Image (cartoon, grey):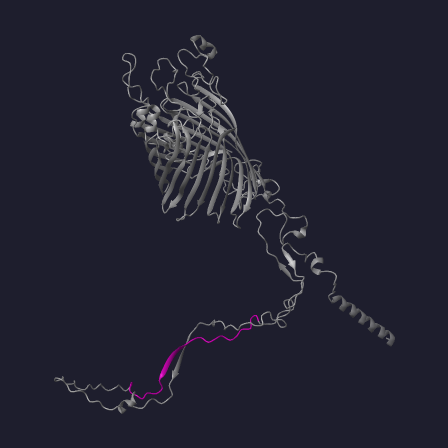
Amino acid sequence: MSPPLRQAKGVGKLLLLGCVVAWSLPMKNSSADPVQTNEVNRLKPHQAVSTNAPPASPEIFNPDPNRLNLPEPPPTDFRWTRRVVVSTNSPPSAPFNPDPGAGLRPATNAPAALFNEPGAPPLFIPPPVPSGLALPREDLRLGEIMPPTNPPPRSFGSEPLTNGLALPRENTRRELKIYQDFSAPKYSLRPFDYPSNSVPEPDRWRIGFVPWTRYTSVVSEQPYATPTPNLWSPYGQSLLKGDLPIFGQDVFLDLTPSSETVTEFRRVPTASGVSGAVPGEYEFYGQGNEISVQNNLAFMVDLFEGETSFRPVDWAVVLQPIFNVNYLQTQETGVVSPDPRGPLGSGNNSPPPNNGDVQNPGDIGPLLNGQVGQANSYRNTQSTERTETFFALQQAFVEIHLVDLSDNYDFMSLRIGTQPFNADFRGFVFNDVNLGARLFGNWNNNLYQYNLAIFDMLEKNTDSDLNSFNSRDQQVVIANLYRQDFIWPGYTAEWDFLANFDQASIYYDQNGNLIRPAPIGTVKPHEVKAYYFGWGGDGHIGPLNITHQFYEVLGRDDFNGLAGQPVDINAQMGALEVSYDHDWARYKASFFYASGDAHPNDGNATGFDTIVDNPNFTGGPFSFWTRQGFNLGGTEINLKNSSSLVPDLRSGKSDGQANFVNPGVYIFGLGAEFEVTPKVRTFLNANYILFAQTEPIETALMTPSVGNEVGWDLSLGFQYRPLHTDNIIISAGFGVLIPGSGYNDIYKTSTDPVPGFDRTDNTGSVNGFPYSGLMAVTLTY
């Protein structure tokens, strides 16, 4: 090969080598950020890149020039060793005198003895020292325990840093703090915005479960049997039962239809009235047998926003319309309506037809307008039977989440509208569904719960006891505070305040009965202002379950009809229940007290009364005394009202005014609950009832004496849940009152029979024993 050709070939090889080297070197572009331009290295959520000048190396800049030299840490080797030393010095010569200067002291003359001293004992000469212990000795071995020595310094962590970790560094990527938000995140559609190693799923609620059959039998429980959500199902994942959002990721709808049918068979004292249902009914009290049926068809609509597994709802709208059908069959006139003909000219909160124009027998015909019953009996007619229907919007409220008070979701919310509320643990004073505004929440990791509520009470429908749309002219203010684990773990204390402002008004119920003012004594519209101060508790102290409540009520009634004058209110109530659980049984003892008024004609009212109570105590709905309300000796007021413990001589619990001139009551109770099976629960209760004071009853009935003993209230109840859930609940019970002397004094038959016309064999007796039979069927879907 010629030299020029060989030289050109060498130049080509150099050019090729230069291109390879240039290609292999990193290319630097000052105008582009490799972290941002590379899709792989693009910043993920919650990441950032440093842009400021990095700190200098510690070799150049020392951030702490005055650093203190702290002592070295203790040695890491805690093993102690034993050291042996052999003596090599010459031992001391014998004999050895430990005090060589003692002989230099001058001798002292001992004083003369006053009497003959005993002589000194002979000198003791010790035995010779064995040869092994005689001095001098050499090559002695001395053992000594030595502490561990410090380990040699280690080089871990002192080696030079790699180039990737050496300072200074630029474009350093760091992870940012992730602030927790339990709501569903809003992801964009850009793939690089998703977290690392994740697959986007816009709707996590509809992912579904993998079908899985736990058991071989298809009739048994099959979890995850429906991976696809249902539209409406009480057991599977359902759109209309609040399991999946209907809008976005956190707006849910829960629809709950229900039906409750309550059938009662009872015998309560019933006056025969001014016009008996059958001829020859001359006794003051007639037949008290009654049959009552109440059916409520309800449909609950609950629309809310928020994932409530972690925190309260952001907002909620709740509606509950109810359609009621009620039926009542009695044996006497004057029960379904004050008009013996039945509900003909009354109703719609208006009084009965005016009969003031009746001046002679001929005027009765136009008043009756042909509405005359059969000559032999008014029973099984509209005079003694009633079937009514009523539609109510029982609940309608809006709830708004105002603020979170801590990271643990201590919160404050506001609820406005017709809503349920119970002022204490057992519903002794106020337990109702009514129109109001309520501020509520908790504090200190849910250790405290609080409520502040004001209600503008609505009138109730007389026969269904459901809300109407008419104002009651009554305001109730309630404030309470609960403290969990108060003194004892598992025990919750409560302090509450209630104010009842019941204005003066005139009101007739839907059946035409005068309710306000109460038609007893001097009938005059009056205003009642009562203030309740309460303290209660519920929970367990050791093995005992305890519920207790105390109320003091103060205030003023500007005119009490029974007292015939204004009265100052000062009354008390106390309740205590102690129970003990043993396996599947609970044994309990209870006591209830409501003060009575011993002087009804003075200016002080000391009988305790409630606002709207509905207590679950001393047997609850199965107890005759608690469940039933009955008339006071043919008057237009009740001795006590239904679903109440207090004999308050009141015209009505929901629409009548509180009356603090009443007899009061003592109730001593024993009971037991047995969970016979997971489906069946049994309730047994026995209560002994006494009036605290009888003077208000004697004043109302104008009778000289009424005993204190009401009698024994005995009840038995069952609850059956065939599906182990609350979708079907069947309750049945029977209660009976064994009358005492006080009850007989009020409801006994005529004491002055007419010989030859009236019966004389039942003088002073009571027309049958009072009883209450109950059967309730509740269906919820």
- Tell which residue pokes out farthest to the top in this image: 362
Across and down, in percent, residue 211 comes to 56, 42
Does residue 761 lie above or below 96 as drawn? above
Judging depth in this view, the residue of 449 and 349 nearest the camera is 349
Q: Residue at x 32, y 87 (%)?
A: 137
Horizontal side of 610 relative to 95 (left or right) equals right
Q: Is residue 538 above or below residue 716?
A: below
Q: Is residue 478 visible?
A: yes
Look at the picture and state if 55 lies above or below 191: below
Span shown in magenta: 132-157
Residue 348: x and y in percent read 50, 22
**Is 38 in front, or is 249?**
249
**The N terminus: image quadrant:** bottom right
Residue drawn where x is 70% and y is 58% of the image: 36
> Does 60 appear above or below 322?
below
Please tell me whether the stretch drawn in magenta is mainly helix, strand or loop: loop
